[in-house]
Image (cartoon, rainbow, N blue to C red):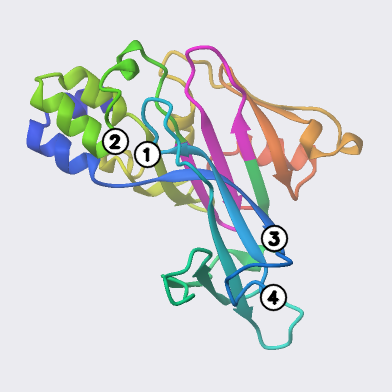
Amino acid sequence: SSRQAFEVMSDEDLRLYARQHVFAGYSVISREKSSNNRMSNKLPLCTRHHCIDWNYVNNKPRPRPNKWYIEGRNSNGNTPFHTWKEWSYATDENGQCYYREKWERISGDELGQGLRLAMRKKKKQLSSDAILVAVGDHFNYIVGRESLDLHTRYRDASNTVELVDLALQNGDRDTAISHLSLAGGHGTISSGWKIDCALQPWHHGKSVFDCLLCNSSCNEEVRVIGNDSAGCMAWEVVLGNDSWDVYECSLSRDELQQLLLSRNMSKL
């Protein structure tokens, strides 16, 4: 288990493990009418709101959502972007974007025109948050920390690295480990929903459902409740003992249930 893996780590191992990052949330695309940024008149603006974040501690989310402008080009102007640039919303003293990133699609995402799925676990007392997103053959997942009394300690820490370092300096491994319990990673559906990259290396090769189900004693029931006419946002997905909201799905209700039931099948 993850707890057992953390227990055998040294304090230095835990400090090194804390120095990574994962987050999940949703983005809103808009256009600004006026801004000091020269990009504002010609490019769409993306505002990203985080639901789960490695660096959220002591109920201290980032003071404002992250924003950037999207610059993309394609061959005919009608198909989805193959590559695009991310220009920072914030600027330096010269009015220039202080960073730029280039992004490109990876093989198997079907240009976003195939399978699309976004689900979030319903809130339940003392249960961790979780999000599952799939595009084409690829999926990403994230499972938040469990709600523990230990998370009220070290309120002066502004991020996970500071909190873990401070806890270990005080010999408080329990608090440090509890903040490192957040899980996340990537995999492919055609492999049988197997994880191929994860924060926790011991999750590599496992089914993502082993990470999403609350624990080994959970039942493995999978159901999609609702009807097609109501739209996917009215559906409820039951995975084990947890219920999930569906935010986007390109499949019918029956197709989604078949996809989730058949752990070893190729993507639809």
- Indicate the secondary structure of the residue bearing disc 4: loop
Magenta residues (range): 119-142
Q: Earlier in the sequence, mark 1 or mark 3?
A: 1
Q: Is residue 74 magenta?
A: no
> Residue 134, position in %: x, y?
59, 50
- Indicate the secondary structure of the residue bearing disc 3: loop
Image mark for residue 114: 3
Is residue 174 or residue 139 the one in the foreground? 174
Tell me which corner region of the image, top left, top right, bottom left or bottom right, holds residue 101.
bottom left
Q: Is residue 129 magenta?
A: yes
Image mark for residue 54: 1
Is residue 160 or residue 11 the one in the foreground? 160
Q: Earlier in the sequence, mark 4 or mark 1?
A: 4
Instruction: Give the alpha-carbon distance from disc 3 to disc 2, as whole Å.
Output: 37 Å
> Residue 145, position in %: x, y?
40, 26
Residue picked out by circle 2: 160
Q: Disc 4 or disc 3, which is closer to the eye?
A: 4
Image mark for residue 261: none
Which quarter of the image is occupied by the N terminus?
top left
Instruction: Give the alpha-carbon distance from disc 1 to disc 3, as whole Å.
Output: 30 Å
Q: Earlier in the sequence, mark 1 or mark 2?
A: 1
- Type of residue at label 2? Thr
- Type of residue at label 1? Trp
Furthest-right residue in view?
Answer: 229
Instruction: Give the alpha-carbon distance from disc 4 to disc 1, as whole Å.
Output: 34 Å
Q: Is residue 256 visible?
A: yes
Furthest-front residue in view?
Answer: 93
Q: Earlier in the sequence, mark 4 or mark 2?
A: 4
Left or right of residue 72, residue 247 in this image: right
Residue picked out by circle 4: 41
Query: Does residue 54 lie above or below 235 as drawn?
Result: below
